[in-house]
Image (cartoon, rainbow, N blue to C red):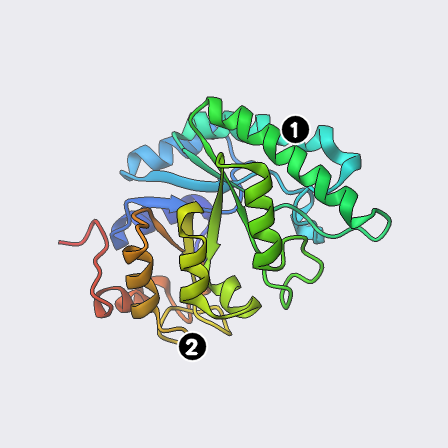
């Protein structure tokens, strides 16, 4: 979502020049893995995370894991993601689980989801890759299967410790708020964090979330991984990064 004023391959150099040492993006699959690896290496970057194949994203699909008729397609997507993760040196993959289906009982969808995720954590875990799931807010993605922390916690428990939670603070705020107690309640399962301010999904400091407090609480809860900036910049990406130093942080590439 950052550096979106230039074609995708040019964003790697822009990210490195801005001071980032790691990147994430939704999907790598339209690009040759060797070319992506070259872009990472040339710019001194590390691939921190990307998503499993999620169906026809442009036409509104948001994952395959809850669809019993697409189990084989989901499994093939896991294998494809594994090949990309190996090529890119990426150790974290996120699963968008999919939408509720009007012609399939919700219990059947849930059972399919748990079975698919258990199988995927096994395949990816053998390669040292941690699978994550993410809750999306029902305002922007109506019908998404994981649309509450109640259901998300149940999935984490039923799949087991091999599955981690991708904590998108923006989606959490727009779904239920109560950010810090919720983060504390699932802190031992958080494997990745993404942020944007609410309600307009711009830079921290432009909305209602007190990110100084939230980020300090994440650190206090023991999270020491990357924080993905999944927001829509109000202007040129580099012009909107000042909040990082204002909040007491520093990009790795900044002196």
Residue, disc 2: 207
Check the picture and name the quadrant holding the C terminus: bottom left
| Mark 2 nearby-residue class (10 Å; few <14, some 14–19, many ≥20) | some
Instruction: State the residue lying farthest toward the right.
Output: 103
Q: Residue furthest top?
A: 126
Say which element carries label 2: loop
Among numbered discs 1 and 2, the one appearing first in the sequence: 1
Q: Nearer the viewer, residue 151 or 165?
A: 151
Which quadrant of the structure image shows residue 250? bottom left
Question: Total of numbered circles in the picture?
Answer: 2
Left or right: 178 in relation to 136: left
The answer to whether residue 77 is above or below residue 134 is: above
Q: Quadrant of residue 128?
A: top left
Q: Is residue 165 left or right of residue 212?
A: right
What crowding class fits label 1: few (fewer than 14 Cα within 10 Å), some (14-19), or many (20 or more)? some
Residue 30 appears in the picture as rendered: no
Q: Residue 19, position in %: x, y?
A: 24, 52
The structure residue drawn at horizontal position 43% and vertical position 26%, both measured from the top left corner, is 87
Q: Which residue is mark 1?
A: 75
Q: Residue furthest left?
A: 255
Percent x, y for residue 219?
A: 28, 56
Residue closest to the eye, 27 or 120:
120
State the residue in front, 42 or 63: 63
Residue at 48% over, 47% down: 165
Q: Is residue 10 above or below residue 31?
A: below
> Closer to the camera, 105 or 171?
105
């Amino acid at each position: 979502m950052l550096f979106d004023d230039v074609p995708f391959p040019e964003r790697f150099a822009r990210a490195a020049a801005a001071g980032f040492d790691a990147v994430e993006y939704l999907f790598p699959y339209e690009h040759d893995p060797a070319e992506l690896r070259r872009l990472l290496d040339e710019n001194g970057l590390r691939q921190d995370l990307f998503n499993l194949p999620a169906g026809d994203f442009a036409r509104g699909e948001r994952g395959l894991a809850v669809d019993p008729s697409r189990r084989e397609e989901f499994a093939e997507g896991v294998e494809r993601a594994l090949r990309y993760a190996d090529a890119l040196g990426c150790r974290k993959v996120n699963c968008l689980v999919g939408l509720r289906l009007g012609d399939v009982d919700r219990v059947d969808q849930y059972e399919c989801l748990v079975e698919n995720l258990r199988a995927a954590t096994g395949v990816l875990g053998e390669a040292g890759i941690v699978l994550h799931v993410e809750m999306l807010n029902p305002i922007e993605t109506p019908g998404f299967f994981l649309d509450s922390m109640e259901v998300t916690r149940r999935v984490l428990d039923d799949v087991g410790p091999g599955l981690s939670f991708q904590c998108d603070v923006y989606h959490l705020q727009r779904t239920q708020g109560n950010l810090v107690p919720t983060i504390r309640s699932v802190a031992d399962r958080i494997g990745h964090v993404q942020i944007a301010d609410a309600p307009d999904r711009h830079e921290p400091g432009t909305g209602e979330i007190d990110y100084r407090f939230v980020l300090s609480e994440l650190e206090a809860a023991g999270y020491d991984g990357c924080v993905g900036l999944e927001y829509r910049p109000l202007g040129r990406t580099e012009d909107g990064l000042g909040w990082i130093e204002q909040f007491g942080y520093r990009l790795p590439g900044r002196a």
